[in-house]
Image: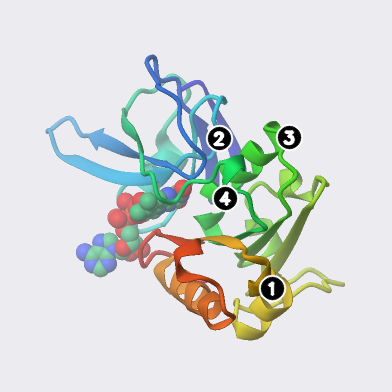
Amino acid sequence: MTSIEDETPRVRTLVLDVGDWPGHRAGQHVDVRLTAEDGYRAERAYSIASAPGEPLAITVERLDDGEVSPYLVDVVREGDAFEVRGPIGGYFVWDPADGGPLLLAGGGSGVVPLRAMLRHRQRSGSDVATRLLYSSRSLDDVIYREELAETDTGLDVVLTLTRAQPPGWTGPARRVDADLLREVAWRAEDGPLAFVCGPTSFVETVASGLVELGYDPARVKTERFGATGAR
Ligand SMILES: Cc1cc2nc3c(=O)[nH]c(=O)nc-3n(C[C@H](O)[C@H](O)[C@H](O)COP(=O)(O)OP(=O)(O)OC[C@H]3O[C@@H](n4cnc5c(N)ncnc54)[C@H](O)[C@@H]3O)c2cc1C
């Protein structure tokens, strides 16, 4: 591993030095495998946080009672080594040629593969109209906060803060529901392409809400992180 960056008190990004990394697409993931001295192994999936062409990076949120994430967030140090398998996945991926308009919806750490897509969009000079709807517990929990605040042509970022809002907050302050989707999502008539990622309940609510708005189910791509973390 080459470097570690704190994103929030519970989340950090690990930049991994993989000698023969074949490159990856925006939206893919890797499997991280940890092996204890007694041979016990644990393996978990982590989305790739970096754009194609950038060094491989993952962004991990600590679940206090989890097995692998506390190790990756609290224990791992620069120079440590662990096994990584990938890149994996060919469905939840976006390339500029796929076009848009693009709706990216992320709950908590579900923003990670969407960030890879945003960086890919920017680095490739794509002008595909893009909206990111990102649900986070509080402003302090927003991952990539500074990066997302940077203006980029044709990109709108809508944050909803579900548990705590700073004084003067004027944005949405609730879980994503049908009304919020109606306000933020592109009109179905425009033929949008959607990527939805996060805890299973978030993904199911958003994906079914988009289909109710008339989105083509084949253009609503989903990635479920599991039942982790209530938002
Ligand atoms: C494709 C994919 C991509 C992902 N990308 C990311 C990413 O970019 N960033 C990220 O942070 N995560 C990501 N995840 C989630 C990640 O794979 C792990 O699930 C997460 O880090 C938790 O792992 P853990 O070992 O810390 O927790 P686990 O030990 O697996 O525990 C997970 C939760 O289950 C509960 N639990 C554990 N054991 C039990 C039990 N026996 N009975 C009841 N409850 C139990 C724990 O309380 C905890 O809340 C991704 C998942 C998938 C499938």
Query: Callout 2: 10 Å neighbours few (<14), some, many (20+)?
Result: many
Question: How far, Cα to Cα, is label 4 from label 1?
Answer: 20 Å
Name of the residue lying farthest toward the top: 19
| Whether residue 61 is visible | no
Query: Image height check: is 216 above or below 44?
Result: below
- The mark lying in front, picked from 2 and 1, is 1
Q: Which residue is mark 3?
A: 125
Which comes before the other along the chain, label 3 or label 1? 3
Q: Is residue 151 rendered to the left or right of residue 108?
A: right
What's the residue at 79%, 51% (across, down)?
A: 154
Q: Which residue is mark 4?
A: 114
Q: Position of residue 19 (x, y in %)?
A: 39, 14
Could you tell me which secondary element the residue under label 2 belongs to? Answer: loop
Q: Is residue 77 rendered to the left or right of residue 164?
A: left
Which comes before the other along the chain, label 3 or label 4? 4
Q: Amino acid at mark 4?
A: Leu
Residue contact at pointers 3 and 4, CB within 8 angstroms: no
Q: Which residue is mark 1?
A: 187
Question: How far, Cα to Cα, is label 3 from label 4?
Answer: 17 Å
Which comes before the other along the chain, label 2 or label 3? 2
- Res 166 quadrant in image: bottom right
